[in-house]
Image (cartoon, helix red, strand yellow):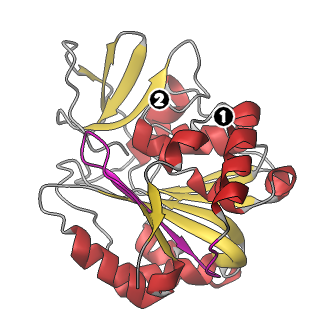
Amino acid sequence: MPRRRNRGGGQPWGASVSGGAGELPEVTLSEQGGVRHLHLGTPWVQGSMRLREPDAIVLEYVQRMMAWLLFVEPDTVAQRRALQLGLGAGALTRFCHRRLGMDTTAVELNPQVVTACRAWFRLPDDGPRLRVIVGDAAEWVRHAPWQGFFDAVQVDLYDHEAAAPVLDDAAFYADVRALLTPQGCMTVNLFGRCARFERSLAALAEAFGAEALWAFRPTREGNTVVLAQRTPQRPPRPQLAARADVIRARWRLPAPQWLRSLQPVQP
């Protein structure tokens, strides 16, 4: 879920969806410059899709959520499993499922978001290698059969006001760590006017260990993406650069640019 305001001139237009969402906010949409945005009843953009290239990742911070690819062999990616906690406009789910060919699961609290993604954001129907679950991520991360199951977990959990991550403590991050395979990696988006990066980093370090953390510098919009590895890795820079070139050529992600901003967190 992107954490920046829609600065375009288009006005959000209603996408009211029934489905027992209770007090959850209503989904609205806007479009500008060939890009469709998802909102939760506020100007904050919760996800975006380029209409002519729906499987591409539009937003810079969302692209950075794919930086776990730097730490795995590219030829093994299609045999791995991905989990998104927070669906947004489905950019990561579409990319992992369609572009990478991964077995992909997403958990989203608001059923209206799932309905909107299927109607307006080209999210495929569930199938043998794709499942979208309506549920509370705080509960689903404790689902015992999922422990040790996922190679990549991408966490982007915000409410309609986007003030701070809604799940951001050591206990939650420890639950996420338990979902990862030994070589698995979590990426998390940290953003919000009430968010405190140092506090979030301390919670991540408590759950994963500081030596397992890598962090990007913030984007222009203020999103900071942090990587947390189940097993700490510190590959040499030439190896990361070679991987980045493969990622750019194979999946059209700006991986070489990531290396200008991504650094291991110093314990």
Q: Residues within 10 Å of mark 1 (few under 14, many from 20)?
A: some
Question: Residue 58 got which mark?
Answer: 2
Q: Main secondary structure of the magenta part?
A: loop
- Taking the spot 53% from the left edge, 38% from the top edge, the residue there is 91
Are there few (<14), some (14-19), or many (20+) residues within 10 Å of tag 2?
A: some
Asked if residue 150 lies left or right of residue 60, the reply is right
Where is 27 relative to 264, above or below?
A: above
Q: Which sits in the foreground, 25 or 96?
A: 96
Q: Which one is in front, 36 or 113?
A: 36
Q: Report x, y in % for residue 195.
A: 18, 64
Percent across and percent down for residue 78 are 82, 50
Q: Residue at x 62, y 73 (%)?
A: 234
Q: Magenta span has 244? A: no
231 part of magenta stretch: yes
Could you tell me which residue is drawn at 49 percent across and 34 percent down? 117
Q: Looking at the image, is mark 2 or mark 1 nearer the viewer?
A: 2
Indicate left or right for 251 with 109 as reference: right
Mark 2 residue type: Val
In the rendered image, residue 223, in percent from the top left (x then y), is placed at: 30, 50
Describe the element under mark 2 as helix, strand or loop: loop
Instruction: Give left or right: position of 88 versus 169.
Output: right
Q: Which residues are magenta?
A: 216-234
Q: How many marks?
A: 2
Three-letter amino acid code at disc 1?
A: Pro
Quadrant (top left/top right/bottom left/bottom right) for the C terminus: bottom left
Q: On the image, numbered disc 1 is attached to which residue?
A: 124
Mark 2 in CB contact with mark 1 (< 8 angstroms): no
Q: Position of residue 215 (x, y in %)?
A: 42, 63
Q: Mark 1 falls on what kind of element?
A: loop
Residue 39 shows in this picture: yes
In the visual, does 175 lie left or right of 180? Answer: left
Sequence-first disc among 2 and 1: 2
